[in-house]
Image: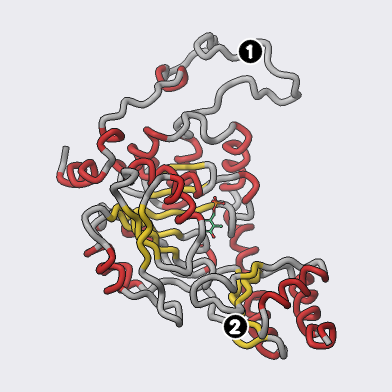
Amino acid sequence: MNEIEKYISGMLRPGIAALKPYSSARDEFTGAASVFLDANENSLGGPLEEDFSRYPDPLQMPLRQALASLKSVEPGQIFIGNGSDEAIDMLMRAFVEPGRDNIVLLPPTYGMYSVQANIHGAEIRRAPLHTDFSPDADAVLSVSDVHSKLLFLCSPNNPTGQCLPEDFILEMLAKFPGLVVIDEAYGDFSGRPSWTTRLAEFPNLVVMQTLSKAWGLAGLRIGMAFSNAFIINALNKIKYPYNLNSMTIRLALQALQQPDSVQEKVRILLAERERLEQALPLLPCVEKVFPSDANFLLVRVTNADDIYRYLCAQGIIVRNRTKEMHCLNCLRITVGTPGENDLLVTALLEVREEEK
Ligand SMILES: *Cc1c(COP(=O)(O)O)cnc(C)c1O
């Protein structure tokens, strides 16, 4: 083991470090063959026109290769999950010993981190963002200790929409005792370089991305974690062998050949976001539109509960975030199509009259 491997395996849960993973039929055989009698599949096939009789590739090699060349990393640096939610789950399983370890969050942030922590029996420590949603480095370090295994940094952050500053993230990478997990679910909208470009510098860095947002494939369920090969091997060792189904793998491979169409849609959504950023502050019910690096806006309104209900009645569903820290009377609004955004603005313009 080299120094990095020693450092990481010291952080793994003891049972996981020692685990011998399940070995599937398709793992054990590599090479060329035409008769597969190794996995008890139905040799006659299934009732559908398309053949799904064979188990999918547990290591997802073609898909990992396609992602590797798109993201300029090695296939061995990629974990692919059933959404990034699976990556969060696997990180907790690998590193957080129930009842002993803790994770650190910067609320307000994505709700899945705390749900997964609760499922895994991890203590949650919180270092809230300031009221302007900037991070508090001293607070993070003062709540952390040797049992702090994961620090979740969502950038751009959900629900605030803002990227965390680079110097703050660098300080966390230098000083946080465990792994620093940067969730870039909205990174494609931010115009900033991904932290995947800096994996070689930081053995404690994990970057999460997803095909659910900019790539427009939320229904396919594909999320990625990028890190050094040692951490990725640990995650691959504990995942369900067939966590991605054959159809997802096939369609994701097709989609990855068309990055230009994704870029074009991102460009349109960013133009629409700007249009909303101009239009919303002019409305009587809107008090503040927070700056956003993502495909949504956090908007402070006169009364979030009332306006949420009013919009629902108009058939327009937004996310009411009024109960989140520092988000009193805030709605999180996804940038829609040009037509949907017009409907939203028109509906909000009529709030006052409707409520009288
Ligand atoms: C939407 C979102 C994800 C994506 O989750 P998937 O399971 O990949 O669909 C991840 N992180 C954040 C912060 C999100 O808002």
* Amino acid type of the residue that numbered disc 2 sits on in the rendered structure: Val
Under tag 2, what secondary structure?
A: strand
Q: Tell me: 291 left or right of 65.
A: right
Residue 306 badge: none
Residue pointed to by mark 1: 42
What x and y, as percent, mark residue 37?
53, 9
Nearest the camera: 254 or 171? 171
In the image, residue 343 above or below residue 24: below
Query: Label 2: few (<14), some or many (≥20) within 10 Å?
Result: some
Tell me if residue 226 comes above or below residue 336 in the rendering.
above
> What's the distance in space between the residues labelled 2 and 1, CA to CA?
57 Å
Residue 238, image quadrant: top left
Give above or below for 165 relative to 61: below
Q: In percent of the image, x 75 and y 19: which residue is there? A: 47
Provide the residue designation for mark 2. 289
Image coords of residue 289 (percent x, y): 59, 83
Mark 1: C-beta under 8 Å from nearest atom of ligand 1: no
Whether the residues at callouts 2 and 1 have beta carbons within 8 Å, the answer is: no
Near mark 1 (Cα within 10 A), the count class, few <14, some 14-19 or many ≥20, is: few
Task: Specify the quadrant that holds the N terminus.
Answer: top left
Can you name the residue that lies furthest to the front here? Answer: 99
Q: Taking 144 as reference, is 33 above or below it? A: above
The nearer-to-camera label among 2 and 1 is 2
User: Which percent across, then down, holds residue 307?
Assistant: 73, 77
Q: Which of 132 and 191 lies nearest the eye of the viewer?
A: 132
Q: Earlier in the sequence, mark 2 or mark 1?
A: 1
Q: Secondary structure at mark 1?
A: loop
Disc 1 residue type?
A: Asn
Residue 26, horizontal then vertical, whole percent: 46, 20
